[in-house]
Image: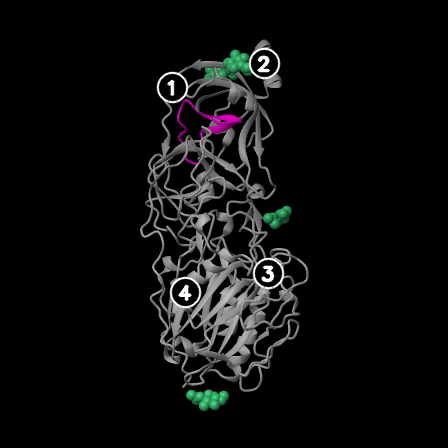
Amino acid sequence: MKRSSLLSWLITTLVAGVSTLTIGEINGDRFLSPYNGQDVSNVTGIVTAKGPDGLWVRSVRKGCDRRVSDAVYIYGPALSKNASISTGDVIVLSGTVSEYRSNKDYLYMTEITSPKVAAILEHGKEVAPKVIGKDTYSPPTVHYTSLDEGDVFAVPNNNSLVSVVNPVLEPEKYGLDFWESLSGQLVTLKSPRAIGRPNQYGDTWVVTADSEELISVLDSNPEGIVIGSPLDGSKNPTDTKLGDTLEDITGVVYQAFGFYRMLPLTKITVLSSQEPVLPPPTSLASDGICSGLTIGSYNIENFWPGDTAHVQAVAQHIVEYLKNPDLVFLQEVQDDNGETNDGTRGHRIQLHLRRARQQQRRRRPGGNIRTAYLFRRDVLALRDPNAADSTTANEVLPGGSLKYNPGLIDPSNAAFANSRKPLAAAWQTLDGNDTFYTVNVHWGSKGGSSSIHGDARPPVNGGVEDRIAQAEVTADFIAAILAEDPEAHIISSGDFNEYPFVKPITDFESRSQMEDLDVVAGIDALERYSYLYDMNTQELDHMFVSPALAKTKPQFEHIHVNTWIAYDDMVSDHDPSVAKMNLCKY
Ligand SMILES: *[C@@H]1O[C@H](CO)[C@@H](O)[C@H](O)[C@H]1NC(C)=O
Ligand SMILES: *[C@@H]1O[C@H](CO)[C@@H](O)[C@H](O)[C@H]1NC(C)=O
Ligand SMILES: *[C@@H]1O[C@H](CO)[C@@H](O)[C@H](O)[C@H]1NC(C)=O
Ligand SMILES: *[C@@H]1O[C@H](CO)[C@@H](O)[C@H](O)[C@H]1NC(C)=O
């Protein structure tokens, strides 16, 4: 190299930083750019889309490494508002490579900031979107990242951070890698289907129609993607429903609020919805005698007598959809004055367990949500009623009967601090005085969980340690009844706030010997859900039966009366379930 050209190279390099990188080189084949923080110049690309705060460019020449995105977001509100730059322009720009996230628990997105356009080389180039699954790998359907080591729900979680390990992308295998390899790209999603409900902004989770896992949590759906705010300022509908078929969606792949997302060029359009809109009522009707009694379970979401419309809607569900079960396990029953925090903890409605008041976790300040039973006095009675107060622990007596009926399980145990205590009761059927036991559960919530698309791997499962401790205490109480009477009929149901395959539930089953009624009754895997969250229909609510009851061929149904409909029409955020079983003891 001649001195003069060496000098000019040095000057160029010093002045402009790293110059003449392709967009692919800027992105690299990992999550983080190898050029993070460096100035780049002479970056050339076609403008594929414009948004309110920036625009997206793609290399003129197609990249050949499918792990590497050849498109990138250019953050610059002034640039995006510059009317002389349009989609289809080939521009040359300089700026700073930057990894951006708005929260430390999210993944970073590579972008170029402080952009300056040096030249517009061409106008009106065609920008064909990449068709997902055709011009790209198919979205992986099982795993999110190698860092989850095969189990996105493993406990303990948060063992590593994507931003620290920064693995080489394997987009054919892992969902996060797949979306990262398309970061900044203009893509088309063909024949998408809604797999959740939009949030208040109209952000809607979708999956491509050829995905097999429409409504299963078993592999937690890495092929799902959220459709965010349209780039043209239009608004996505907020009443999209689970299973709706949508028009093809074209947009850019982006990262915000903890999730990969597509920002569509314009609002999404619903083509058709599932029929019927509401599920049929349960087919399980009580026979009114011990050989065929029905048991419901329902989290009735911050229920209180003052909200007449909600009370009537819940009652309508119980009467029409659950067909008036003989016994209903309720969760989230507030005190008489609802959310008014004046020390009141009673409730006027005849739940028959008024004295089982609890120092409850205040999910809503002052609400004191707790579990309760609703039962038919013409079919059932509490066996030797003798209610404990809110601080007295129930006990299993020799022979298996309960010291208090009903009574809370170990209410002062640290496992239940700031949470709901399980309520144990013993019942007798009026036709034959057959005894059975129930444990009504509302374990601690998943609040504090990190995004399934987030930095921590496996993602933080909020409150899981509490639920593991709660599972032990709940299971040990049930195991104590079974130790006294291995043939005891026991039902434990409620909102366990955990999936059936995650440690709190698997621990509960193995310690208590209780059997999951989904398994006992052979419920189809795709039917096992009671809740919608992000891309996953999921099962937080369960019913478990003791071994002797499992042998009597109980039936079970989840009634998707809340998950199938739009937000505004929901009565609760959970679906109820109903079972029919033979509770004749001998
Ligand atoms: C800018 O990039 C073009 C190719 O896109 C190249 O021909 C040119 O030499 C580069 N200029 C500088 C100053 O690096
Ligand atoms: C808009 O972009 C053109 C082309 O780069 C540039 O000449 C012009 O100064 C820009 N306008 C503004 C207001 O930045
Ligand atoms: C995960 O662990 C790291 C420490 O390795 C910590 O900095 C981070 O806050 C944790 N993430 C969450 C969501 O708790
Ligand atoms: C049920 O038990 C009560 C006493 O608790 C007894 O009076 C009654 O006869 C019993 N009924 C039947 C059907 O066994």
- Residue 361 or 481: which is nearer the viewer? 361
Evaluate if marks 4 and 1 touch, with contact meaning CB atoms under 8 Å apart: no
Q: Tell me residue 572's x, y (percent).
A: 48, 56
For ligand 1, tell me if the residue under mark 2 lies within 8 Å.
no
Report the Cα–Cα distance between label 4 and label 2. 86 Å
Report the Cα–Cα distance between label 4 and label 3. 37 Å
For ligand 3, tell me if the residue under mark 3 lies within 8 Å.
no
Q: Which residue is under mark 3?
A: 465
Task: Indicate which disc, 4 or 1, sits on the residue closer to the N terminus.
Answer: 1
Badge nearest the viewer, 1 or 2: 1
Element type at mark 2: helix
Element type at mark 1: loop
Q: Which residue is under mark 4?
A: 319
Evaluate if marks 3 and 1 touch, with contact meaning CB atoms under 8 Å apart: no
**Span highlighted in magenta in the image:** 49-74
Tell me if mark 2 has few (under 14), some (14-19) or many (20+) residues whose alpha carbon lies within 10 angstroms of its own: few
Q: Which residue is under mark 1?
A: 125
**Amino acid carrying mark 1 in the image:** Lys
Residue 7 in which image quadrant: top right
Could you tell me which residue is drawn at 42 percent across and 84 percent down?
A: 585
Badge nearest the viewer, 4 or 3: 4
